[in-house]
Image (tube, rainbow, N blue to C red):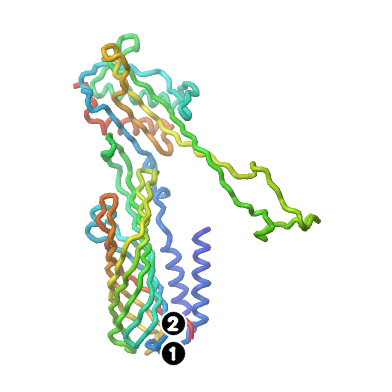
Amino acid sequence: MKTQFRTAMLLITSLFFLALIPFNSKAQEKRLQLDLNYAVGIPGNSFKNDAIEKTSTRGWTANLLYNITPNISVGVGTGFQDFYQKYPRAVYKLNEGGEVSAVVTNSIQTVPILAQFQYRLLPGKTVQPYVGVGVGGNMIIYDQYLGEFENSKSSFKFAARPEVGLFVPFRKEGPAGIHLFGAYNYMPYKMNGVENLNNWGAGVGIKFPIGS
Amino acid sequence: MKKIVIPVLMAAGILAMTSCKKDPVKNLEGDEGQIYITKHADSVSFSSFKTFSIADSVAVIQNNKLLGKELSASDAAYIQAVKDQLTQRGYTLVNKNQNPDLGITVSQIYNTSTGVFDYGSYWDPYYGSYWGPDYWGYGGYGYSFPSYYYGTYSITEGAMSIDIFDLKDAKESNKISGIWNGLLRGSGVFSVSAANTGVKALFDQSSYFKAS
C-alpha cells in the first residue's frame, strides 16, 4: 500500500514538473534545474569489512540546482541508499558474558542533505561533463538484527560527496537530458565497530528545468 | 513533449521501486529468526559432573508466575533433546532418586507487556473531520467519551529456557546453584523441530560442557 502511494505521488510529481518544462530554453540560462537519479552504492573498505559487503542497488539521488553562470550551479542535494546484508548463522560472544547463536542482519539507510556546487566544463555541448561537491549532513539509520530481534540506532552526521558526471541534453543546447554521475560518499560514522560508511556511488537519471 | 514523458515516467517508476528498504525480518527463512543464548558459571568445571537427571515435564511461566506443568509433543522433544546432548557429551542419565550431579529443568517462559493507543480526539468538531453534533440535531453540544474508548494492545513474547543446577555440591554449599542456562527465542521455538536443532546448537556452542 505504501509503495503504491509512493509510486502514485512520484508519478503525479513528475507530471507536474513536466507541465512546467520550457522546452525551447537553453541549459545554461539562469534557472532552476532538477535531476532525479537511480543510484547504486558500493561500500568502501571499513564499511565493507565491518558491516556490509554487498553493493546496494536500492537508492536514488536528487539535486535542485540554480545556474549562476553557464559554468557554475549551486543548490541542494539529497538521496537515499539502503544497504543490507544477512550473514549465515554464527556464534558470537556477548559483552555481558555468554554466547549467542544468530543470523545477523545489518540494515543501514543513509539520507544525506547537502549544499551542492557544480562546475560544467563544456556548457552548451552535446556531452557536458561536470565536477561537483556536496557538503552537509547525513541521516543514518542503523538496524542490526539478531535473528528477528532488532537493535536500531539513528544518528545525524557530517557528509561530503565529491562527484563527476555527464549531462547529455535531449537536443542541442536543450535544458533537459540524461544525467550520469559517479561519486564518493564520505560518511564518518563510529558505531558497532564500524569506522565509517564511506561508499562509492554511481547513478543515471534525468535532468530538467523547473519553472519558466 | 512526448520525448520526455517516457523517460520521466521510467525514472519515477525506478525511483519508486528502488526507494523501498529491504525488510530484514521478511527476508529470514526457516529458523533464521531464532536466536540461541547460553550463559554459564565461569568458576565451574563441567567435567567434574558425571550424572544428570531431568524433570519429566515442562513448567509454563507467565510474567514470573507458574501457570502449571505440561508435557506436549514439543515439550517432550525438548526433554529428549537435552538427554541426547548430555549423553553424547559423556554424562549418564539417572533417576532423580539416585543422587544426580546435575539437575535439569525445562520451562516455557512468557512475558506480556501492555500499552494504550491514544487515537486523539478525532471526534472533536474542532478537527472538522467527524460528524458534527448538529448532524444529530444538537448543534452546540459536544461529544463525550468514557476513558475505555482508548485502544489497548498487549504483546506476549515467549522463550524456551533450559536450566542446569549443581546438585553435587548442594549440601556443602547449602544452596542449589544454577551453573548453565540455555535460552531459545524467536518464532517457532515451541516446536519439535526447534527442539532438536535449537538444543543441539545450545550445546554445540558450549564446548566446555563435557564429562571428560
- Residue B204 lies left or right of residue B3; in this view the side is left
**Residue furthest front in the image:** B140
Picture coordinates of residue A191 (x, y %)?
A: 29, 52
Instruction: Please count the marks in the image.
Output: 2
Q: Position of residue B79 (x, y in %)?
A: 37, 23
Please name the residue shown 46% across and 32% down the image: B110
Q: Nearer the viewer, residue A159 or B208?
A: A159
Q: What residue appears at the point 40 percent right and 55 percent down from the top-left corner?
A: B22
Q: Which residue occupies the extreme left position in the image?
A: B212
Q: Which mark is residue A209?
A: 2
Mark 1 residue element: loop
Whether residue B84 is visible, yes or no, is yes
As displayed, is residue A96 above or below residue A114? above
Do residues under tags 1 and 2 come within 8 Å of each other at their CB atoms? yes
Q: Residue B21 in the image: state x and y as whole percent.
A: 41, 57
Say above or below: A126 vs A179: below
